[in-house]
Image: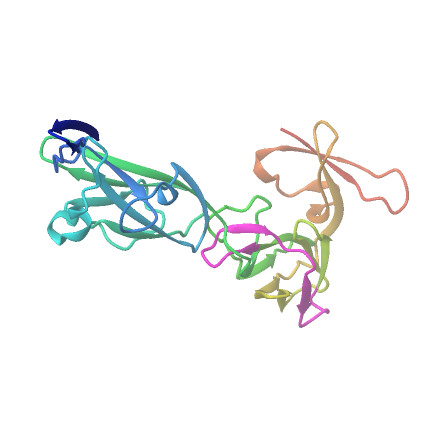
């Protein structure tokens, strides 16, 4: 704004001149960016490049189109025709998007993993795009599962319907795993409650309360029992315990398994089928050496040479 003074006779004439800067509005898309809300963009609503969410969360995304001067082109939000030019995709098949086109979308997370949400606009001359990387954590504790692996698959439950003790088994180890409602591993169960309907068939013990490890031991020569595991506020799980019959003509001797460097390979005492002091079979093609316990009541030690 400027001021010009002129004099005419005894009067003073003041002219005020207004000046302004005019920015050309090209309406040509130059870049796009992801926001959390629709309407006029603000810096508070601009999404970061990475975000952490949980399995089951719904995450809203809004794309905004700008010209080369950083002016928001609202037509890509107001017009169905222009909004339909915006395309969405997921970097890998984890979770779901509500739609594949439009100026806004909602992503629903499932498996705990890392995934990118990509939005693009084909202007005819160039393809503009933006993305956000989402790290998905497991959701709340939901379900107990009886599983057989001490290193559970992080995103897939592998429940056991039946724990079978063969004729050569005295016991089996299983793990009680806590997963969210999408099957993601949360942790091993603790503060467990275990029940089974026939103690004459099997006995169940908690071997490691921090890592959900339980031991099922044979109590009978044969039979079937049902085991239920539960924990407060989590859906319980159950399985059958099947005890295979043993051949009465064969002696089963308890042994302790060690590897060839002398460290314990398995603290659980298992019964292996033996004929005198010789094994009928060798598991996993390994060489097996039996060393008698020197003290009364000590089981023979099984050494496995790979």
Q: How is the image coloured?
A: rainbow
**Residue lying furthest bottom in this view?**
197
Q: Is residue 170 in the magenta section?
A: no
Tell me the quadrant of the picture where the C terminus can be found.
Answer: top right
Question: At 72% across and 27% down in the image, what residue appears?
Answer: 261
Tell me the quadrant of the picture where the N terminus can be found.
Answer: top left
Q: Is residue 38 left or right of residue 29?
A: right
Q: Is residue 267 left or right of residue 26?
A: right
- The residue lying toward the viewer, choosing from 150 and 274, is 150
- The residue lying toward the viewer, choosing from 138 and 72, is 72
Question: At 68% across and 65% down in the image, what residue appears?
Answer: 194
Residue 46 position (above or below residue 183): above
Which portion, as a residue range, is magenta? 178-202
Percent position of residue 274, x then y: 70, 46
All told, the count of numbered labels is 0
Question: At 84% across and 39% down in the image, what residue appears?
Answer: 293
**Residue lying furthest right in this view?**
296
Percent position of residue 165, x then y: 62, 57
Q: Is residue 182 in the magenta section?
A: yes
Percent position of residue 64, x then y: 24, 43
Q: Is residue 176 left or right of residue 44?
A: right
Percent position of residue 51, x then y: 43, 42
Residue 288 position (above or below residue 137): above
- The residue lying toward the viewer, choosing from 259 and 250, is 259
Q: Is residue 225 left or right of residue 143?
A: right
């Amino acid at each position: 704004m400027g001021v010009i003074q002129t004099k005419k006779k005894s009067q003073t004439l003041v002219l005020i001149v207004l000046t302004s800067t005019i920015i050309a509005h090209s309406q040509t898309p130059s870049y796009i960016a992801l926001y959390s809300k629709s309407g006029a963009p603000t810096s508070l609503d601009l999404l970061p490049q990475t975000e952490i969410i949980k399995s089951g969360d719904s995450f809203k995304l809004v794309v905004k189109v700008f010209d080369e001067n950083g002016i928001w082109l609202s037509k890509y939000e107001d017009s169905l025709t222009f909004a339909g030019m915006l395309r969405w995709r997921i970097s890998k098949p984890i979770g779901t998007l509500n739609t594949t086109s439009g100026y806004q979308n909602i992503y629903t997370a499932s498996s705990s993993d890392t995934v990118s949400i990509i939005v693009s606009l084909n202007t005819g001359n160039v393809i503009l795009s933006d993305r956000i990387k989402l790290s998905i954590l497991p959701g709340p504790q939901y379900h107990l599962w009886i599983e057989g692996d001490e290193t559970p698959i992080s995103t897939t439950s592998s429940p056991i319907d039946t724990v079978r003790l063969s004729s050569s088994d005295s016991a089996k180890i299983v793990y009680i795993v806590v997963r969210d409602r999408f099957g993601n591993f949360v942790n091993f169960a603790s503060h467990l409650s275990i029940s089974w309907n026939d103690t004459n068939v099997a006995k169940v013990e908690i071997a490691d309360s921090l890592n959900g490890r339980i031991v099922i031991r044979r109590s009978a020569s044969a039979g079937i029992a049902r085991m239920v595991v539960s924990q407060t506020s989590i859906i319980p799980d159950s399985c059958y315990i099947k005890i295979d019959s043993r051949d009465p003509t064969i002696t089963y001797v308890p042994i302790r398994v060690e590897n060839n460097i002398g460290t314990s390979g398995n603290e659980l005492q298992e019964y292996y089928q033996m004929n005198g002091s010789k094994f009928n079979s060798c598991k996993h093609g390994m060489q097996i050496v039996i060393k008698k316990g020197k003290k009364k009541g000590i089981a023979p030690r099984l050494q496995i040479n790979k």
